[in-house]
């Protein structure tokens, strides 16, 4: 009798980040459709809560991501309480791979550097876990990742050496694919795919009340990608277009006032705006699928968080990518085949935002039809990763470099 195939997915952290929830839901749906013999085991910060949230997904289990009560953390925590030091963060359990057969290292931008060129703890932890998994004989794959670029050659060399341990590198946009292909790698599958979040379905939601002639624009602005100075650009848009109403769409829910919290950031936007009566905010806690359902009702989406953009494009809502790094540019290019619908958050002006918004609204019917027509492509490109994962695991084929995606737009 064949033993069950256990697949570990790590790197998503908290599912209060709806992008991480969308990655898990999309991945679970792909396994259910394509490889139902597998059990997906997801490492998160709050596994008990997440198991309740996913009670409709029979093929998903959750485990604790980090080790909270290590001797070092207990000692450092004691010192912090008496005013010595700042303690140490919870780090990922590097033994999560035990009793699993496949390890998926969650993509997003985990394999990217910090603004100062250093490596985030989560990347260092994922590399340790990946190395341990590969040494133990697991099939190790990056899963829907943006990788680099790394500004320091020593760091780039370290990353390249680590990626040699992975049998499959599933990269979610062409810029990352080209970058990884330029590294001195061999014996790897290097594959361009779509982000697994494209595979998550839309949950029908209650109709948003609309006034005759009103245009509803969804907005996702995050405190990490934008600043309070950017509020002026959206106020300019509202000032010049009296028929526009904004629906602020949180995609990361965190502690009130936390640096990651979309809700408090957008509440501060509404509080300072002279057009607050035309700004609504979705409540916290809706989850990824319901939020995608509300995005589907918008005429247009302007979003800074990339998985909010993924939700918009896969729901058929024309989406303007507010970008702060190459990953956003690459993901917009994947969707549209060009970079026209990209706007940098660096030095964002009201004039630029109004011009891009007006341009998109003038083509809104064609853009909506284009996205609807391409949703099959998005899902097909997402599940392409699982096809190659299954083939690598069951076929025992020697890894070969795989081409990037090419599409007629």
Image (cartoon, rainbow, N blue to C red):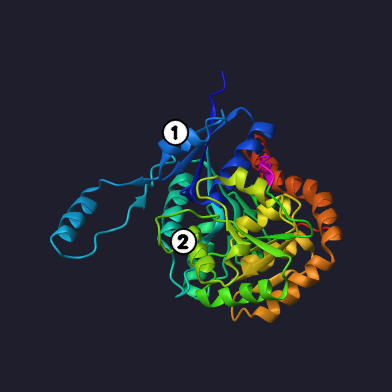
The stretch drawn in magenta includes residue 203: yes
Front-most of 347 and 277? 277
**Principal secondary structure, stretch drawn in magenta:** loop
Q: Are marks 2 and 1 in contact (CB under 8 Å)?
A: no
In the picture, which quadrant includes the C terminus?
A: bottom right
Q: CA distance from mark 2 to mark 1?
A: 41 Å
In percent of the image, x 44 and y 44: which residue is there?
44
The location of residue 361, given as percent across then percent down, is 79, 66
**Range drawn in magenta:** 198-207
Circle nearer the viewer, 2 or 1: 2
The stretch drawn in magenta includes residue 210: no
In the picture, which quadrant includes the N terminus?
A: top right
Q: Which residue is label 2 attached to?
A: 264
Mark 1 secondary-structure assignment: loop
Residue 108: quadrant of the picture? bottom right
In percent of the image, x 81 and y 50: which residue is there?
372
The location of residue 357, given as percent across then percent down, is 74, 70
Q: Is residue 190 above or below residue 344?
A: above
Front-most of 205 and 44? 205
Q: Residue furthest left?
A: 82
Residue 268 can be seen in this image: yes
Q: Which residue is label 1 attached to?
A: 99
Disc 2 or 1, which lies upstream in sequence? 1
Residue 339 can be seen in this image: no
The location of residue 126, given as percent across then percent down, is 45, 53
The total number of labels drawn is 2
In percent of the image, x 84 and y 56: which residue is there?
370
Mark 2 secondary-structure assignment: helix
């Amino acid at each position: 009798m064949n033993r069950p195939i256990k697949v570990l997915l790590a790197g998503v952290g908290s599912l209060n980040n709806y992008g991480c929830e969308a990655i898990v839901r999309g991945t679970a749906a792909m396994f259910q459709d394509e490889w139902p013999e597998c059990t997906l085991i997801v490492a998160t910060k709050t596994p008990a809560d997440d198991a309740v949230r996913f009670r409709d997904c029979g093929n998903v289990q959750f485990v604790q991501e980090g080790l909270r009560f290590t001797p070092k953390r207990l000692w450092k925590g004691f010192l912090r309480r008496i005013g010595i030091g700042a303690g140490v963060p919870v780090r990922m359990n590097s033994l999560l791979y035990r009793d699993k057969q496949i390890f998926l290292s969650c993509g997003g931008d985990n394999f990217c550097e910090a603004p100062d060129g250093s490596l985030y703890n989560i990347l260092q932890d994922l590399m340790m876990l990946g190395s341990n998994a590969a040494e133990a004989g697991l099939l190790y794959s990056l899963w829907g990742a943006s990788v680099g670029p790394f500004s320091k050659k020593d760091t780039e060399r370290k990353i390249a050496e680590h990626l040699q341990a992975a049998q499959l590198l599933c990269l979610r946009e062409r810029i990352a694919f080209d970058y990884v292909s330029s590294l001195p790698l061999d014996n790897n599958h290097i594959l361009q795919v779509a982000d697994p979040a494209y595979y998550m379905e839309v949950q029908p939601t209650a109709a948003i009340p609309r006034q005759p002639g009103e245009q509803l624009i969804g907005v996702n602005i995050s405190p990490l990608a934008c600043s309070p100075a950017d509020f002026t650009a959206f106020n300019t848009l509202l000032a010049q277009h009296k028929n526009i109403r904004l629906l602020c769409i949180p995609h990361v829910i965190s502690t009130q006032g936390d640096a990651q919290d979309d809700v408090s950031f957008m509440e501060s936007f509404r509080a300072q705006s002279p057009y607050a009566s035309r700004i609504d905010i979705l409540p916290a806690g809706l989850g990824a699928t319901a939020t995608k359902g509300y995005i589907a009702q918008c005429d247009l989406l302007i979003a800074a968080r990339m998985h909010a953009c993924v939700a918009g494009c896969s729901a058929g809502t024309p989406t303007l990518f507010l970008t702060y790094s190459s990953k956003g540019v690459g993901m917009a290019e994947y969707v549209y085949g060009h970079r026209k619908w990209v706007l940098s958050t660096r030095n964002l002006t009201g004039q630029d935002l109004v011009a891009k918004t007006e341009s998109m609204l003038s083509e809104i019917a064609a853009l909506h039809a284009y996205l609807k027509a391409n949703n099959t492509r998005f899902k097909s490109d997402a599940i392409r990763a699982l096809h190659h994962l299954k083939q690598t695991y069951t076929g025992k084929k020697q890894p070969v470099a795989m081409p990037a995606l090419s599409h007629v737009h």
